Amino acid sequence: MKRRNFIRNTFLASVSPYPFIKNFVGINGENYTELKKHKITKVERLVFDYNWPRYVGKNARKGNHGQYHSDVAFKLYTDQGAMGWALGRKNVKDEELFQLRGKLVSELISPELGMRKGLNVYLDLALHDLMGVILNKPIYKLIGDNGSKDTPIYSGMIYFDELEHEGKVGGIDKILENCQWDIEYGYRQLKVKIGRSGKWYSHGQGLKMDVEVVKQIKNAFPDITLLVDSNDKYTLQDTVDFLKGIGDIPLLWVEEPFRENYEDGKKLRKWMNENGFKRTLYADGEANPNHELCLRMGKEEIMNVYLPDIRGFGFTRWRHLMNDLKSCKMLASPHAFGSMLKTHYITHIASALGNVVTIEGVTCFSDQIEFGDYKLIDGKIQVSDAAGFGMKLLI
């Protein structure tokens, strides 16, 4: 299985080999009179279009990411006139999606436990939105309301944009231009893609360019907080050499320096602690992680931030994972790249449960979506108080 494929466990009913994932699935939605009144009568699978504010280039693993995209949404209607929707996924089978028809919402989801067992993980977000619409509350107030309404947010869109695109070579000036755009938009944290030595450059030149890019960004924008992400294309030695190269430039975190493993992770954490990067977090576990290993590394204060994707891992799973992370003294930052919808879903996890160090921001525009009242002001994003997730699909 490729590293970048999202988790493809189809059913939450699957037996988990990981003891830290509790048997949270079940249902008590019948305690909510309003949920018992609503029966799902119609289910739709729709494709919507959206775009990023600019063309996004390469990272350490993949070629150009483009600008104009589409994705799949699921819309759920009830016999009482309620409608909820959210990101779905194109590979969900019709029989998995349409089995919701004829079911009471109280059979499928509850505020305390989330989505019931036996349902495809990619139905989770739409069911949460529908529940919030029916109960007329934002999701974060239904599932916790124990965090802050404002959470730090970073731009996850600083890629290898010095490389050629459509016959033009951007240079570092193009990267700085993109940083400036994100700062003017409201971001005060920028995640810089590194790992050029893995594919697009010779090893030495790639590492040198990674260091130079970070230095120039920090020089141009000294008040901005930086994060770096090498998409598993560094080795332990590459990571150390990069950190030596940037010197005293502080980093909020180092993400995916290499495929998570205990020995290299322990050595990296020790080196950072002893060489001026003690406060720099080690973040990993974005896609198909070894959960047991990551939690062990968290308990031993090797890995500091856990990153599974909010859609692929599942909103309900994330809700119930948070207590385990807190007990390990691990922070959370669910992966969101690709869609601002995912960014907004995560604000509800952060505002309900806390423990989210920062949120991955993915600026998007669409004529087919109203992204809701999520305010990005001076480096923080504020959760919406509208019912459900508070966004509208206009198709």
Image (cartoon, helix red, strand yellow):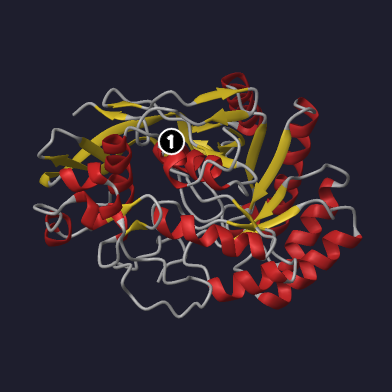
Residue at figure coordinates x 68%, y 71% from the top left: 297
Can you say which quadrant of the picture contains the C terminus? top left
In the rendered image, the vertical position of residue 307 relative to residue 345, given as above or below: below
Q: Residue 205's spot in the image, x, y percent?
A: 71, 52
From this viewpoint, is residue 371 visible? yes
Residue at figure coordinates x 35%, y 36% from the top left: 388
Q: Residue 69's spot in the image, x, y percent?
A: 32, 37
In the rendered image, the vertical position of residue 357 relative to residue 169, given as above or below: below
Q: Count every numbered label the image shows and give the total.
A: 1
In the rendered image, the vertical position of residue 373 relative to residue 344, given as above or below: above
Q: 257 or 83, which is in the foreground?
A: 83
Can you say which quadrant of the picture contains the N terminus? bottom left
Q: Label 1 belongs to which residue?
A: 340
Residue type at tag 1:
Met
Q: 142 or 368, which is in the foreground?
A: 142
Q: Quadrant of residue 162?
A: top right
Q: 8 or 300, which is in the foreground?
A: 300
From this viewpoint, is residue 87 visible? no
Q: Residues within 10 Å of mark 1 (few under 14, many from 20)?
A: some
Q: Is residue 171 left or right of residue 131?
A: right
Q: Is residue 72 left or right of residue 95?
A: right
Residue at figure coordinates x 59%, y 41% from the top left: 147
Residue at figure coordinates x 50%, y 58% from the top left: 308
Q: 119 or 165, which is in the foreground?
A: 119
Q: Quadrant of residue 161?
A: top right
Q: Farthest residue toward the top? A: 184
Q: Residue 176's spot in the image, x, y percent?
A: 66, 28
Q: Quadrant of residue 350?
A: top right
Q: Residue 289's spot in the image, x, y percent?
A: 52, 68
Q: Considering the numbered disc 1 on the image, is that residue within a helix, a strand or a loop?
A: helix
